[in-house]
Image: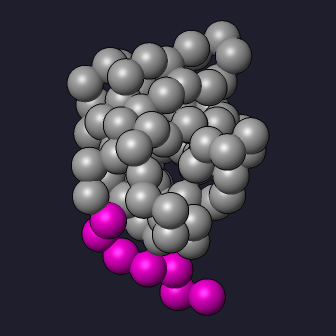
């Protein structure tokens, strides 16, 4: 294995359209509201978050994925807990 190969071993690029399975628990930044529902944008994907508190926008939360449409890059999840605030 060359130095170049060793340097780049394990390196991969993250896509702008992630894929999740129902039951996955992920940490996301709540970016806004659409139609009265709290949403998080993950790359080019949108996750609608159910049962989120009224002040969830601009916070980091744990969400359990309920549904995920890989082709449409959207899904729904259930709020678990707030884990932090925005740095901005």
Q: Residue 32: x and y, percent?
A: 67, 58
Name the outermost residue toward the bottom: 88
Left or right: residue 8 versus residue 15 is left
Q: Residue 30: x and y, percent?
A: 55, 59
Q: Is residue 29 above or below residue 86?
A: above
Whether residue 9 is visible: no
The magenta segment is 82-88
**Which quarter of the figure is the N terminus placed in?**
top left
Task: Give the residue drawn at x 39%, y 44%.
Answer: 51
Whether residue 66 is visible: yes
Q: Residue 5: x and y, percent?
A: 41, 48
Task: Give the residue drawn at x 29%, y 69%.
Answer: 83
Task: Give the residue drawn at x 73%, y 44%.
Answer: 34
On whether residue 86 falls in the magenta region, the answer is: yes
Coloring basis for residues: one colour
Task: Give the residue drawn at x 49%, y 28%.
Answer: 76
**Which quarter of the figure is the C terminus placed in?**
bottom right
Q: Is residue 61 above or below residue 19?
A: below
Left or right: residue 64 versus residue 85 is left
Left or right: residue 34 versus residue 51 is right
On whether residue 71 falls in the magenta region, the answer is: no
Q: Is residue 80 above or below residue 20?
A: below
Q: Quadrant of residue 22?
A: top left
Q: Quadrant of residue 17?
A: top right
Q: Is residue 68 above or below residue 25?
A: above
Total numbered labels: 0
Q: Residue 84: x and y, percent?
A: 36, 76
């Amino acid at each position: 294995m060359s130095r170049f190969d060793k340097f780049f071993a394990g390196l991969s690029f993250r896509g702008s359209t992630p894929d999740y399975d129902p039951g996955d628990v992920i940490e996301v930044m709540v970016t806004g509201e659409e139609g009265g529902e709290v949403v998080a944008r993950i790359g080019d994907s949108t996750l609608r978050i159910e049962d989120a508190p009224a002040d969830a926008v601009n916070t980091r939360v744990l969400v359990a994925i309920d549904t995920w449409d890989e082709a449409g890059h959207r899904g729904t999840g259930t709020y678990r807990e707030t884990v932090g605030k925005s740095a901005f």
